[in-house]
Image (spheres, rainbow, N blue to C red):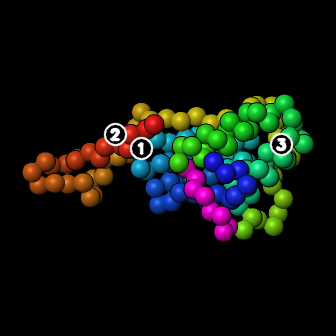
């Protein structure tokens, strides 16, 4: 994982919805979905705005050194889950990352939760996964996780 480059949403397999205090991200390739509340939501917004993880780490280290390890873990988890992909040619937002001010006031450790209990349902494609000899649903198999 290169911390010095920008990342972008790994669409079309990944979609996200911003609910203000929380962002829900759905990985259509493996059926998992993720909850990013509070500071994690701000981190996501800064990442998709084109700020490199390294920039966010520096902002966090200045504002809340005690939360820097948790933020590093969050960044690693988001990228490792395949939710973002490298976008080395992307330009960062002209605005400063919002993470520094959000993390300064944080009362919780930045983290996110992953869920896979609906993976079978998400992977069942009722429009495209109909096979005459099998019927519906012809479930896709999620890629193996390493």
**Magenta span dominant secondary structure:** loop
Q: Is residue 111 visible?
A: yes
> Between residues 10 and 104, which one lies in front from this camera angle?
10
User: Quick one: label 3 or label 2, which is nearer the N terminus?
Assistant: 3
Look at the numbered disc 3 and give the secondary structure of its residue. helix
Can you tell which mark lies on residue 111? Answer: none
Above or below, comparing residue 68 to residue 13 in the picture: above
Q: Is residue 86 magenta?
A: yes
Q: Locate residue 87: give its quadrant.
A: bottom right
- List the residue tagged with mark 2: 120
Query: Where residue 42 sits in the image (x, y, percent)?
Result: 73, 48
In-image side of 88 versus 58 (left or right)? left
> Between residues 53 and 121, which one lies in front from this camera angle?
53
Q: Which mark is nearer the camera, 3 or 2?
A: 3
- List the residue tagged with mark 1: 31
> Between residues 62 and 103, which one lies in front from this camera angle?
62
Look at the numbered disc 2 and give the secondary structure of its residue. helix
Question: Separation of disc 3 and disc 1 at Cα?
Answer: 31 Å
Above or below, comparing residue 92 to residue 136 in the picture: below
- Magenta-tinted stretch: 83-90
Estimate how packed mark 3 is, as few (under 14), some (14 to 19) or many (20 or more) residues with alpha carbons within 10 Å.
many
Residue, x 67% and y 43% (percent of image)? 75
Residue, x 62% and y 36% (percent of image)? 112
Residue, x 16% and y 54% (percent of image)? 131
Query: Where residue 114 sits in the image (x, y, percent)?
Result: 53, 36
User: Quick one: label 3 or label 1, which is nearer the N terminus?
Assistant: 1
Dots 2 and 1: beta carbons under 8 Å?
yes
- List the residue tagged with mark 3: 60
In-image side of 88 versus 108 (left or right)? left
Look at the numbered disc 1 and give the secondary structure of its residue. loop
Farthest-out residue, right: 62
Question: Separation of disc 2 and disc 1 at Cα?
Answer: 7 Å
């Amino acid at each position: 994982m290169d911390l010095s480059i920008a990342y972008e949403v790994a669409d079309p397999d990944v979609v996200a919805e911003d609910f203000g205090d929380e962002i829900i991200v759905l990985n259509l390739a493996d059926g998992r979905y993720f909850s990013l509340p509070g500071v994690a939501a701000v981190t996501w917004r800064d990442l998709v705005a084109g700020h490199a993880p390294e920039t966010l780490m520096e902002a966090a280290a200045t504002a809340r050194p005690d939360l820097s390890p948790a933020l590093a873990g969050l960044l690693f988890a988001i990228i490792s889950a395949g939710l973002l992909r490298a976008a080395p040619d992307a330009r960062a937002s002209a605005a400063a990352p919002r993470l520094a001010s959000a993390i300064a006031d944080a009362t919780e450790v930045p983290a996110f939760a992953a869920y896979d209990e609906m993976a079978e349902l998400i992977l069942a494609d009722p429009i495209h996964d109909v096979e005459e000899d099998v019927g519906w649903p012809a479930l896709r198999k999620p890629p193996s996780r390493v």
